[in-house]
Amino acid sequence: MNTNLSKSVQYGFGLLSIAIISRWTSGNAVFTAPEAFLRYGFIGTVSFSAAGALAFLALIPIIKRIRSSEESSSFLAIMASRLSEPALKWMKRVLLLAIFFGMAVMGFAAGILVYPLGTPVPVGMSLFFLFGFLIAIFFRLKWFTRFSMLKVGILFLIMIMILVHAYMLEGIEVVYDGIRLYHPYLLYVEWDILPLLLTAFTIAMLGHLLLDLKMWNMLLKSKREKLRLGLSMTGLIWSTIPFSFSMIALSAIYKGGFQNFYSVFEKIFLRYEHFTITILLIFILMVIFFETFLSQIHSLYVLYDRNDLKLNKHMWGILILFVAAIPGWAYLFSISLLDLFFISGVFFAAALPVILQILWSRKEKGMLMPSAVLIGTLSGWTFLFFSEGPNSILVGCVSSLIVLLIGWFAVNREAVHHD
């Protein structure tokens, strides 16, 4: 793996912003915010969109510190230089789980897309995973990922077209009056819940960003002087995606009620006079999600250090997990995309203090790092059974931080005792 920055193509802030937005054009960006809107009201989508911007802004001091002190162009190489061999082995499994969560989100989004066509979400997930993994195993289709820049422009074009059709042709006032009549609770702003939602969403998103290998690859190859502007622009632009799709969701329910979250998007895609338009929109969004899914699979190959033989051996087990186990789990427990965000968010929140500790301190660290992630994750998931998702994310983060603090005090106490 090439670790020489001078031999790599460097990103300017414009290209960096587009590349990162392309990487994070996922099911969370498109579908999770509208579901948060329907569950928490207007404050849900505002906090989700703002949290994305804050997470990208929080990356700036972290990556600038790493770029000023490290010459490596690989996040895995940085971890290897700061972790013992057993700890590195387990932290790679943490990264593997992060990739799995990212894949699960993409499959869930694909299942929501095909729901208007009469396909149950779990079935749509299984078909998406089956097709995606088989393509990755037998063809790889590296050329497909070259259109990642183009998909950002197409996504924003779709957003504008749907918004124009929904509000300009039907009338903003008509939509507003319909929401006020049928769903007035969506317009009520609960300011007291804003700090909790904003903090939980930001922690989960920042943890996810710090565990993404492709994200690190782009940040370590970008021009240092462009990092601040590039990440700032990325956060501001990305935050418009979840907010826009939340407004699109409002335009689909102003005429009456809805059975569940999936039926909201069913109304969005089936509102057009010609069914061909519906098929075209679903197909384009599916291609966008598929490109992001392939980038997740690419991260698997990076994690396995390009050991295709070893990964292909494990790939069939991974295929069974995603094609059968995850859709079955989502069906049996009626998991929604927002629920999946909270479940994965607990894990990312638990990993956040650990990753920051690894990046901030150059001392070699041991098994305390993966142990903190494990304890924080299990604590948050346990709390998730009894409380709301945002609270569980905070519990996961705090539990992991407490484990790190206990380990730090123990090490310092032992050092003082020896002295």
Image (cartoon, rainbow, N blue to C red):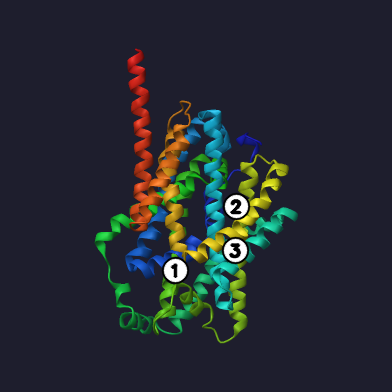
Q: CA distance from mark 1 to mark 3?
A: 17 Å
Q: Residue under circle 3?
A: 288
Q: CA distance from mark 1 to mark 2?
A: 25 Å
As drawn, the residue found furthest toward the top would be 419
Q: Is residue 8 left or right of residue 381?
A: right
Residue 229 visible in rendering: no
335 to 235, vertically: above or below: below
Q: Amino acid at mark 2?
A: Gln
- The x and y percentages for residue 319 are 65, 55
Q: Residue at x 53, y 37 (%)?
A: 90
Q: Is the residue marked by circle 1 packed among few (<14), some (14-19), or many (20+) residues within 10 Å? A: many
Pick whichever, 368 or 140, lies toward us: 368
Mark 2 and mark 1 in contact (Cβ < 8 Å)?
no
Q: Residue under circle 1?
A: 244
Of the residues under marks 1 and 2, which one precedes in the sequence?
1
Q: Is residue 300 left or right of residue 16?
A: right
Q: Residue under circle 2?
A: 296
Judged from the image, the secondary structure of the residue bearing numbered disc 1 is: helix
Number of callouts: 3
Q: Report the quarter where the N terminus lies.
A: top right
302 to 136, vertically: above or below: above
Mark 3 and mark 2 in contact (Cβ < 8 Å)?
no
Indicate the quadrant where residue 133 lies: bottom right
